[in-house]
Image (cartoon, helix red, strand yellow):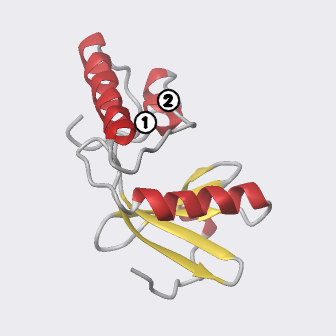
Amino acid sequence: MYKKPNWALHRRRWIDEKSLTATKQGIGLVIAVKKLNQDGWQGHQEWLAEVNYLGQFSHGHLVKLIGYCLEDEHRLLVYEFMPRGSLENHLFRKGLYFRPLSWKLRLKVALGAAKGLAFLHSSETRVIYRDFKTSNILLDSVF
């Protein structure tokens, strides 16, 4: 799906700033918009890989890619929003919102992440996910 973006996004509403991306919560349907840092060929290649591969997959342990936008130098990915944030934030309690996880819950998250990886590795179009880390394991509202 392609829709011309509204570039009047306010910087204060960005949720997570990273070296390659920034994420912003949408209005109405709850989404996360991942904005590519416009510097670098590697970032563009990673954006293309996400569009080409993640859009094909649907699995309960993978974040859904809802759409994307490519206009001039602007590259956006639109995902379902994960309201509980990253596993990294919970494990290292980054911020007051993130509570420590019980060992039972940690095991549940690890099993879910393993199921998502197994799905990618065993699908017809095999994907080797090379950026597997706690900051990329996102938790939904029922985790």
* Residue at the extreme top of the image, as rendered: 103
Does 92 appear above or below 24?
above
Residue holding disc 2: 134
| C-alpha separation, residue under disc 2 versus residue under disc 1 | 5 Å
Q: Are marks 2 and 1 in contact (CB under 8 Å)?
A: yes
Q: Position of residue 44 (x, y in %)?
A: 68, 63
Q: Amino acid type of disc 1? A: Ile
From the viewer's perspective, tell me whether residue 128 is left or right of residue 85. Answer: right
Q: Amino acid type of disc 2? A: Thr
Residue located 46% across and 44% down the image:
127
Residue located 57% across and 75% down the image:
9
Tell me the quadrant of the picture where the N terminus can be found.
bottom left
Disc 2: CA contacts within 10 A as few (<14), some (14-19) or many (>=20) = some
Q: Position of residue 27 (x, y in %)?
A: 36, 73
In the image, 27 versus 120, the foreground residue is 120
User: Helix, strand or loop at disc 2?
Assistant: helix
| Residue 67 in sight | yes
